[in-house]
Image (cartoon, rainbow, N blue to C red):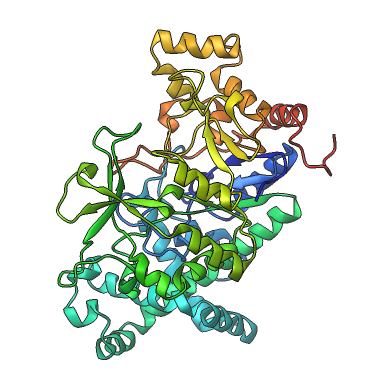
């Protein structure tokens, strides 16, 4: 569905300032919403917010439907009387501009465990009823997730395919045994989801009241070591004996990697999913729409055809394209959920068939300005080649910041950029590309916070195919100044992207 002319900001919630070492759903999140509203923005794009494992990537989550407990605000729990200021007396000395995930986990998990115990012992009848209602309505994913995580804890984090066979295959007697044995830990995982979604719902309500819509993110694939694969193995291409991925997801060689990207996720058993009328996908989209307004589908092209790499390969080069039933899936989703508010991440190897699938459902595609200045005048990322039904970015979470990108260009490449823009302004290349995005014909423009702040490569969020050191960047208290807001608001008004009800 096409969207009105508008703009917004890209920022993962872990990037908020916080005395707990990682961004959370507390006061700074509300201040960020205020910044968006004051700047005449209409969107906050958040990226995935699921619980993460090794590498801390939200694209490799333990659950496609759960929230990350690390971004629960301890101060909001304190407001409920579940924690006290004394519980915060010995906080670690966290870095101001990045997340030290190991230190954060050591600090926040004990706080969440303490709040859980207090809730268990002190919750009022109304709170108990709310918790029970949450557990019942989310049972279709929450039961598997809580048990899965509790077992992982008991087994020191071992992947589910290494568990004893009867447990790996979810045999009823084994499941019942572990449910009884781990009942307290299961309660903890259900409780943290209850608090995550309560805090998120309150923040979303505040955002919507201020005219801000939240753009969430559905990664097309889920992690192999996840409650989704363990709980629904029939939906994935797995080795029947070992439980490992028989066919792995990835992409062939591209802009980001000469050997392609081997993600390791199992690809879908689309035949089985289609036979169930895509029940799991309907549930996944419904779960997402419970807490965001718009969904960005990551790796959209995989719904037309996906790159499948056989088990045992060490790079993505040995894969092949396999057709997927994307059109049938989106027709079912529209029938069940209504017209989907979707943005399509259509980057990479895009064929006419992928474009036809995107256009069949009028999903806006993505245009990245950092990709615009190679090649000739036919480059689809040059603004004069845009159509209105698209989302324009200076760069994404997978790109370097605009300042970092420009600094790495050759002198000839810099000259090409300068010639297109007319010149590089004294304000810096980041403001030149922000202006180019906002002035373009694209209905929506999304700007990463790092580009508003003019930060370099040190603020890059993610380097694809790099195993660690990603997803750590945070902005600092007072970075989002009134001056920055006024500047962004001026450009937003100038290029016709302000909400109609704003003070213009």
Horizontal side of 454 relative to 152 (left or right) equals right
- Residue 27 shows in the view: yes
- In this rendered view, identify the residue nearer to me: 243 or 319: 319
- In this rendered view, identify the residue nearer to me: 288 or 272: 272
Estimate the x, y position of residue 11 in percent, counting from the top left: 54, 43
Horizontal side of 51 relative to 167 (left or right) equals right
- In this rendered view, identify the residue nearer to me: 231 or 25: 231
Horizontal side of 319 relative to 340 (left or right) equals left
| Quadrant of res 70 | bottom left
> In the image, is residue 27 above or below residue 451?
below
Estimate the x, y position of residue 168 in percent, counting from the top left: 23, 76
Q: Residue at x 43, y 48 (%)?
A: 301
Q: Residue at x 45, y 60 (%)?
A: 68
- Residue 83 shows in the view: no
Estimate the x, y position of residue 277 in percent, counting from the top left: 47, 73
Q: Residue at x 40, y 65 (%)?
A: 63
- In this rendered view, identify the residue nearer to me: 498 or 349: 349
Horizontal side of 393 relative to 167 (left or right) equals right
Quadrant of the rendering where the C terminus is positioned: top right
> In the image, is residue 15 above or below residue 165?
above
| Quadrant of res 484 | top right
> In the image, is residue 493 above or below residue 338?
above
> In the image, is residue 8 above or below residue 327?
above
**Number of marks present in the image shown:** 0
Estimate the x, y position of residue 473 in percent, counting from the top left: 44, 39
């Amino acid at each position: 569905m096409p969207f009105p002319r508008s703009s917004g900001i890209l920022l993962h919630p872990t990037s908020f300032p916080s005395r707990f070492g990682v961004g959370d759903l507390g006061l700074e999140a509300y201040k960020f919403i205020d910044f968006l509203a004051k700047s005449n923005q209409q969107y906050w794009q958040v990226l995935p917010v699921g619980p993460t494992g090794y590498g801390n990537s939200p694209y490799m989550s333990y659950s496609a439907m759960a929230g990350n407990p690390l971004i629960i605000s301890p101060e909001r729990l304190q407001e409920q009387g579940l924690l006290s200021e004394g519980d915060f007396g010995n906080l670690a000395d966290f870095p101001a501009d990045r997340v030290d995930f190991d230190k954060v986990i050591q600090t926040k998990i004990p706080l969440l465990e303490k709040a859980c115990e207090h809730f268990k012992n002190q919750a009022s009848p109304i709170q108990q009823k709310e918790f029970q209602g949450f557990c019942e309505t989310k049972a279709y994913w929450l039961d598997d997730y809580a048990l899965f995580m509790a077992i992982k804890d008991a087994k020191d984090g071992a992947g589910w395919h290494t568990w004893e066979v009867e447990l790996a295959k979810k045999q009823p007697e084994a499941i019942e045994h572990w449910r009884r044995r781990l009942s307290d830990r299961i309660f903890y995982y259900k409780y943290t989801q209850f608090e995550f979604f309560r805090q998120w719902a309150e923040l979303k309500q505040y955002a919507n009241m201020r005219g801000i819509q939240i753009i969430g993110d559905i990664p097309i694939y889920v992690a192999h070591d996840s409650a989704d694969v363990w709980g629904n193995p029939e939906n994935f291409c797995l080795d029947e004996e070992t439980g490992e991925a028989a066919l792995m997801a990835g992409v062939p060689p591209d802009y980001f990697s000469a050997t392609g990207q081997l993600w390791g996720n199992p690809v879908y058993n689309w035949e089985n999913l289609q036979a169930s009328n895509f029940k799991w996908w309907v549930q996944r989209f419904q779960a997402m729409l419970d807490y965001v307004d718009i969904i960005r589908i990551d790796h959209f092209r995989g719904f037309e055809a996906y790159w499948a790499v056989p088990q045992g390969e060490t790079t993505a080069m040995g894969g092949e394209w396999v057709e997927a039933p994307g059109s049938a899936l989106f027709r079912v989703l529209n029938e069940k959920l209504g017209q989907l508010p979707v943005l399509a991440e259509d980057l990479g190897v895009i064929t006419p068939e992928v474009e036809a699938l995107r256009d069949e459902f009028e999903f806006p595609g993505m245009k990245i300005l950092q990709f615009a200045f190679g090649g000739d005048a036919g480059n689809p990322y040059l603004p004069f080649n845009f159509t209105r039904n698209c989302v324009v970015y200076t760069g994404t979470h997978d790109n370097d910041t605009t300042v970092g990108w420009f600094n790495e260009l050759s002198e000839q490449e810099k000259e090409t950029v300068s010639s297109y823009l007319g010149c590089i302004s004294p304000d810096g290349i980041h403001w030149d590309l922000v202006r180019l995005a906002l002035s373009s014909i694209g209905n929506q423009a999304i700007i990463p916070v790092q580009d508003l702040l003019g930060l370099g490569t040190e603020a890059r969020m993610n380097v694809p195919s790099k195993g660690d050191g990603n997803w750590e960047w945070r902005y600092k208290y007072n970075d989002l100044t009134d001056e920055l807001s006024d500047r962004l608001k001026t450009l937003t008004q100038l290029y016709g992207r302000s909400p109609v009800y704003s003070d213009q």
